[in-house]
């Protein structure tokens, strides 16, 4: 991981100010002389800039993100806890962590931070920008805010704005976190029980009924307690607590709720018409959080777009698990769209 220190004030879309920034990022491969062989990967909610770690089978020689051909970039998002400035960072004006005082940030703020990094790296064109879930939010906004920069846009299991359904999950997670008094007290070590509960709620939106009923089913018809599904939820919650900051989780769920490409652009349709990139929208048939209708809306309204669907039993998490299907789908898109 590398870190870019940006010693200038960063003004957020909502009018907040961060006195300076640190931007954590990973790169793989080599930037060519034209500075355009770039695949820019936008990560989802609790991932990091280390694409190899959270998307195994995608980065490397001969893989989709071929390090022998491309310069792959992934920046850790603003508000996270994996190196980029976030609620756990020290506010230089107070000498204490920001925690709940960290300003409200939007997806457009993430894009502007990406732009700082792009200029630092000397990138002239982006061959493909790709993102899933809220990574797709970033990739879509980037393509609208800087249409001449991006040649191809790949969205997986994402949408043009946060739906009421997704907003309801976000608010439910935050309500769970608010029930943890250590979080409300702005305790730097607080919020862990709330985060565990919030993660349990999130998991239900990421998977499917069929998957749970198959993997967590009980063989003992006499059991009254200690069910597998309950243990699984607790385990997954504890697993996230060990690696993620509760205040960052709050921050990023709030950020997700701001996503609406139509804001200030005369609606979603008008915003989609401004995209100049060739667009691939990939839906996952079993996705409960981002139903395929959301990807179809983008494909139907962007000027040069196609829709493809992946059949998976893993729900929203299918984009992480079905690497073979994702690879085949993107390669076919490249083949049909002047891949270089």
Image (cartoon, rainbow, N blue to C red):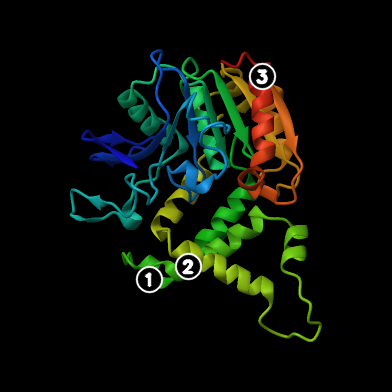
Residue 300 x/y as whole percent: 72, 24
CA gap, disc 2 and disc 1? 9 Å
Q: Residue at x 44, y 33 (%)?
A: 108
Residue 191 x/y as whole percent: 41, 66
Dots 2, 1 in contact, CB < 8 A: yes
Q: Residue at x 58, y 64 (%)?
A: 200
Left or right of 286? Residue 115 is: left
- The residue where tag 2 is placed is 194
**Sequence-first tag of 2 and 1:** 1
Disc 1 crowd rating (10 Å Cα; few below 14, some 14-19, many 20+) is some
Can residue 297 be seen in the rendering of this structure?
A: yes
Q: Which mark is residue 182?
A: 1
- The residue where tag 3 is placed is 335
Dots 2, 3 in contact, CB < 8 A: no
Residue 38 or residue 303, whichever sits in front: 38
Please name which of the two marks, 2 or 3, marks the residue nearer to the observer.
3
Write down the quadrant of residue 63 in the picture.
top right
**Sequence-first tag of 2 and 3:** 2
Write down the quadrant of residue 74 in the picture.
top left
Query: For the residue labelled by badge 2, is the local secondary structure a helix, a strand or a loop?
Result: helix
User: Vertical placement of 190 versus 210: above or below?
Assistant: below
Please name which of the two marks, 3 or 1, marks the residue nearer to the observer.
3
> Which image quarter holds the C terminus?
top right
Disc 2 crowd rating (10 Å Cα; few below 14, some 14-19, many 20+) is many
Residue 195 x/y as whole percent: 48, 64
**Sequence-first tag of 3 and 1:** 1
Disc 3 crowd rating (10 Å Cα; few below 14, some 14-19, many 20+) is few
Query: For the residue labelled by badge 3, is the local secondary structure a helix, a strand or a loop?
Result: helix
CA gap, disc 2 and disc 3? 46 Å
CA gap, disc 3 and disc 1? 53 Å
Left or right of 267? Residue 105 is: left
């Amino acid at each position: 991981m590398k870190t870019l220190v940006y010693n200038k004030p960063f003004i957020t879309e909502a009018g907040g100010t961060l006195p300076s920034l640190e931007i954590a990022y990973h790169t793989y491969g080599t930037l060519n002389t034209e500075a355009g062989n770039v695949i820019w990967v936008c990560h989802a909610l609790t991932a990091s800039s280390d694409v190899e770690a959270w998307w195994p089978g995608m980065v490397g020689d001969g893989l989709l993100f071929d390090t022998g051909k491309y310069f792959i970039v992934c920046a850790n998002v603003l508000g996270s806890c994996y190196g980029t400035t976030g609620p756990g960072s020290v506010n230089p004006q107070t000498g204490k962590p920001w925690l709940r005082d960290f300003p409200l940030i939007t997806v457009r703020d993430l894009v502007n931070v990406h732009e700082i990094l792009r200029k630092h790296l000397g990138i002239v064109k982006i061959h493909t920008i790709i993102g899933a879930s809220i990574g797709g939010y970033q990739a879509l906004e980037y393509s609208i805010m800087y249409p001449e920069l991006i040649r191809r846009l790949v969205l997986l299991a994402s949408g043009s704005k946060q739906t009421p359904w997704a907003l309801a999950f976000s608010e439910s997670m935050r309500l769970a976190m608010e029930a943890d008094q250590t979080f409300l007290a702005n305790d730097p070590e607080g919020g862990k029980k709330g985060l565990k509960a919030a993660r349990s709620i999130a998991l239900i939106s990421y998977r499917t009924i069929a998957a749970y009923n198959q993997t967590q089913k009980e063989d003992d018809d006499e059991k009254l307690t200690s069910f597998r599904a309950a243990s699984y939820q607790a385990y997954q919650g504890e697993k996230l607590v060990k690696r993620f900051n509760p205040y960052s989780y709050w921050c990023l769920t709030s950020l997700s709720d701001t996503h609406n490409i139509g804001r200030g652009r005369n609606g979603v349709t008008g915003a989609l018409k401004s995209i100049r990139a060739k667009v691939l929208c990939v839906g996952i048939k079993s996705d409960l959080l981002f139903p395929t209708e959301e990807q179809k809306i983008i494909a139907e309204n962007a000027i040069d777009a196609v829709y493809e669907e992946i059949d998976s039993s893993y729900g929203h998490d299918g984009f992480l698990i079905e690497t073979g299907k994702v690879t085949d789908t993107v390669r076919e898109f490249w083949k049909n769209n002047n891949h270089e």
